[in-house]
Structures are given as structure tokens and as C-alpha cells.
Image (tube, rainbow, N blue to C red):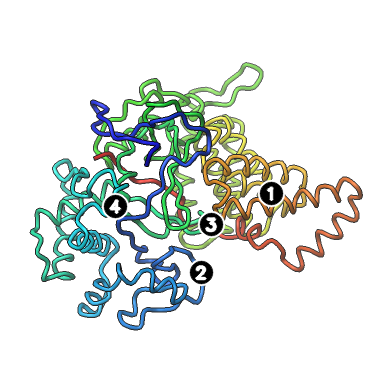
Amino acid sequence: MDNVEVFDTGVKGRGLRTTKDLCAGEVVLAEPSFAAVVFDSLSQQVCHSCFRRQANLHRCAQCKFAHYCDRTCQTACWDEHKQECGAIKKNGKAPNENVRLAARVLWRIQKDTGIVSDSQLTSVDQLEDHVADMPADNLKELKIDVHNFLDYCPNTRHGVEYISHIFGIINCNGFTLSDQRGQQAVGVGLFPNLCLVNHDCWPNCAVILNHGKVELRALGKIAENEELTVGYVDFLNVSTDRQRALKHQYHFDCTCKSCSKNLKDDLMMAAKETEGNKPSDELVKEVQELSLECLAKVEAARTAGDFHEVVKLCRECLDKQEPVLADTHLYQLRILSAASEVLSYLKFFSEAAEYSRRMVEGYMKLYHPNNAQLGMATMRAGVTHWHAGLIEVGHGMICKAYAILMITHGPNHSITKDLESMRMQTEMEQRIFKQNECVYHSMREAALQNKPMGMMAEAVTQPIKAKDQLFIDKP
């Protein structure tokens, strides 16, 4: 924690700033969770200790709810799980993840107080709950959670007001945890130091889960005494939509430079220009409305598992979009993303590769050059090109993704290590391709028969359930 200090930002309240100059990719701070739980829907597929997603997990013999990789993970988690285990056994079932996380937070506060180490910069009690700012529907949900908590922990010494405070803290400070591949959100945790980092739509830091800890990493050079910021929401939305989402979830009005100056909004909603000519405003509006309708149908078809319908909808929509919307238009990028992902899953790699290339080219004009989501999207596009036999383009994309993820994830993250293996594999194949194309294609077909490079296949043949997202707020 020598790299940072708490300071008063003024309007935004407390924040963190650097105490020395930082370089791109440098770890500013690393922090284990104060408490964390696996999502209800993935309780049998994800280890409740290390949050790795895998098959054949071992179930807790007592509560029959928690699952672990092995005895090592179970032993490591026992201190957190033992009270939970007894409560689940007594109730006969586990409550939802919000109630389970609140219980774990309160049990730890009761045992260790709100500060568990000298490196913790703030106590859990000092985090903002925004209960007073909640709309009626959210307050109703909070009351239900408090009622369920009291059924789950009837002997708690805490009153309703304090329990509500903890639920409020979780609501606006919880951090969504991803699996080891960064492919799916699998749980939620509370990280007190991370909660001190304020939001900016064009942040100077990224947050990554690595070996059970969150790491705050510098995205570029950061000067001494400069405030550290992260993005609470995805930048790939126009400023008014980002502001609306931030106000709803985190109860503040974003006045960052990107929002106050509406930076890149024009690109995100741009019409296509051909030789100085643009389509009419009426046509642009019509295609945008059609796109929104299509995106809703695509999501419904994806949820239903009707992937061929997804492809049909995307193709039809792209035919309407291409003459009208620019390559950076959000609606076109979202259709390209859905189409490339599902076509890869269906193993139509050539078509998927073209869509993924266009998507990444649009992303590169909008995202920060060291954005983690840009790196992941570029990686998947590179692997899709590799599967399509387009080795040179695929290798180039994998190298670009590796350069980004070395900064956002670091060299020791499992994603970066797998990406390094991909880079070496595609580099070797590219050399063979340049020497003799016929030999390359023969070797490639043989390799695909044996299904090498499992991560390469996984990166494009599993529909993504949820993206890594950050949900934190300032105290």
C-alpha cells in the first residue's frame, strides 16, 4: 500500500491517489476479499473458495450446498464457510447470494471488526450505503433481503437498520468476480480498499481478479499525486446512458471529461459517410429503431438457445445497417458482436472472422487503447481467424491482444499465460504457412482433428454468459 494514500477529493468525497510515478501495467494495489460468494445459479459449477469454474467439484458433506475443487480449497475456505454451513443445514436451503454475502460480511465484522489488516485503508462500516437515495422498488427489495436474512440468521445481534446498512453497502460497492478465463461472471465480493477508488469514464486504472485477489493496474503512466480512477460502467455507451446507469446504481452525477464534453458520442451514433454523402436523418432514425428491435429479439433467441435464429436476425439487421450506420455505431457493433460469437459457436468460422474483425476495428476507435474488454475481444477475434485458417491476421490480432492484456492482466494471469501459448503456436504456424501453404493447411487439418490448444477453442466456442464488470462506489 506504499503506492497510494487516501485523500479528500472535494465533491466526490474520499479517493485514492498515487504517492509516486507509476508505469503502464504496474500493480497499484492488490487486495483479497473481505467476503465473497458464488452466484446462486453457478453454485454447483464454481469452486466456493477459488472461484474457478470446472466440472466434478466436491460437495460439502454437511450443508450439501458449497462445492470445492478439492480438500485444499475446502480447508482454505472453512473459516468463512463454517457459520454459513451451520445456517444452511438448519434452514434446509441456502438463501440468495445477497443474503449469503451480507451474512459473511457480518460474521467477519463480528469476528475481526471491520478492519482485518494494517493494509486496509477503511473499515467496512465507513463505506457508503446510499439507502436514503434508493427508489421505492429498490427499498422494497432491500426489505425482502433483510427479512430473509433474519430467517437465515435469527440469532443475530444486529438490528434491522444496521443490516440494511450492510445490504446498501453491498448494493453499491460489490465487485463482480469472473472465472479463471475472464469469460463469465461467477460471484460477488466486497473489497474495502478498492471501494475508495472513484469512477471516471476514461479511467487511468483497470481492476482484474488474479489468484483470488483483485489487482488495481495502471493503464498508462500516472504521475505522483494523481487521483486513481476506474470505470464503474462500460465506456461503450453514449454519455447520457452512462450517466443514467451511474445515477441509478451508484447515486451520483458523473461530470468526468468524457461525459461533460460528450466525447466520442458522435462516433458511437454516427451515420455512414460515402464520398461526402450521408443518409437522411429519417433513414438513420428508422435503422436505429429497427436495430433496437433486432437486439431485443437477438437477446431473446440467445436466452432460448436458438442460435440459428440469432444468426438469421443478425444477418438481416446488418444488411439494413451497413449502408446507413458508421462502423463505430454502437448498434452495429452490438450486432457484430452477437453474430461473431454465435457463428463461432456454430463453427462457421469464416463468416465469424469477418464480423469479429469489423467489430474490433470499431472498438479500437472507441475504447482506451489498453482497455481490458478491447484486449479480450481482440483475443477472441484472433482465435476465430485462426480457426478460419486466416493465420496471418489471426496471429496479428493475438499479438495485439497479448500487448493489451500484459498491461491489464499482467504476465502471471491465467488468461495472459494461455494467450502467450497461443501467440507461440500461431507464430510457428505462420512460419510454416509462409514456407509452404499446402504443408501448412495439411498440418492444420491434422491438428484440428486432434483438437490442440484447448483454450483457443474455448475462447470462441462457448457463448459468453456475462462480461467482467466492475461495480464499486466511493465511501
| Quadrant housing residue 10 | top left
Up-down relation of residue 282 to residue 462 (above or below): above
- Which is closer to the viewer, label 1 or label 2? 2
Q: Nearer the viewer, mark 4 or mark 2?
A: 4
- Residue 228 position (above or below residue 418): above
Spot occupied by residue 154 in the image (x, y as percentages of width and height): 12, 71
**Is residue 64 left or right of 147 when viewed as pictured?**
right
Which residue is nearer to you in this view: 355 or 87?
87
The image shows residue 432 at horizontal and vertical percentages of 86, 51
Under tag 2, what secondary structure? loop
Choose between 373 and 84: the one closer to the eye.
Answer: 84
Q: Amino acid at mark 4?
A: Ser
Check residue 425 in the rendering and tell me which mark sits there, or answer none. Answer: none
Q: Nearer the viewer, mark 3 or mark 1?
A: 3
Which numbered disc covers residue 54?
A: 2
Image quadrant assignment for residue 113? bottom left
Residue at label 3? 181
Q: CA distance from mark 4 to mark 1?
A: 52 Å
Q: Which mark is residue 117?
A: 4
Amino acid type, mark 2: Gln
Name the residue that disc number 1 marks: 351
Mark 4–mark 2 distance (CA, rounded to whole Å): 32 Å
Q: Residue shown at 39%/67% (left/top)?
A: 48
